[in-house]
Amino acid sequence: MTDLSALIRLCPPPPTQPDPVDWDRVETELGLRLPEDYKRLASTYGPGRFGDYIGIHHPHGVTRYSNLTGPMPARIREYLQRDYDQGTYPVPYNPQHLFALGSTDNGEYLFWITEPEDSPDAWRIAVNEARGPQWFTYDGTLTAFLISVLTGTTDVPQFPDGLLNQPVGFTPSVPPPFEVADPPVRPPVDTEDIRNWARANGFQVPPRGRIPREVREAWEQAHPV
């Protein structure tokens, strides 16, 4: 069984076939070839989120910051480069070899480690800590990473303990009713600061694990970049 077949059994794709992707155009626009497993995954599922937590960037992303060819990968790389140059956080790879391919509800980013650049099927996956210095590296493809995380085989320290407490699946992205501006790249913030702010403002938050999306959005609105 291929990794994609295993992922389909675990997380069935939408019943409606996604719009086809012009991969030649996408790769020309990005200036690099993409892993074949990603192209098969994106062509099968379309834009959306896995496990109600992991969003994968897609050439047909419904907003500019969830679009694989949008501005966010470059902006995130610039932020990491600044960290790397200043020694603010120990970025374990040259930021020029990190390409942001997705994000989570808690604000972590998923990256391809684009080494060697001319062998995309050998690229590994890295995950940063949303509001801290920790990094995690997975020695395999994006599809294999999703299977491993969503079956509980791989434990990513940055991900919440209760990630698999609910059934896993795939949720297609829905276009917003209005144009969404590119979000700023927010500097790291300790999750305990968010929890303390939430409790002081009447929100119920668990002592550990995933911060509810409505709490995180309220905190971001109260603390603009």
Image (tube, helix red, strand yellow):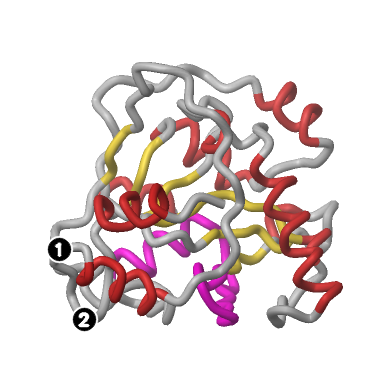
Count neighbours of disc 1 (C-alpha within 10 A) and say few if under 14, some if 14 to 19, many if 20 or more: few
Of the numbered discs 2 and 1, the one sitting upstream in the chain is: 1
Q: Is 222 a magenta residue?
A: no
Could you say where residue 206 lies in the image, as x and y percent from the top left?
Answer: 18, 75
Q: Is residue 194 left or right of residue 183?
A: left
Q: Is residue 130 left or right of residue 34?
A: left
The answer to which of 52 and 147 lies nearer the viewer is: 52
Q: CA distance from mark 2 to mark 1?
A: 15 Å
Q: Which residues are magenta?
A: 127-151
Could you say where residue 25 lies in the image, as x and y percent from the top left?
Answer: 73, 22
Q: Secondary structure at mark 1?
A: loop
Q: Which quadrant of the figure has residue 211?
A: bottom left
Q: Which quadrant of the figure has residue 83?
A: bottom right
User: 71 above or below 178?
Assistant: below
Q: Which residue is mark 1?
A: 202
Of tags 2 and 1, the one toward the viewer is: 1
The kind of residue tagged 1 is Gly
Could you say where residue 126 lies in the image, as x and y percent from the top left?
Answer: 60, 68
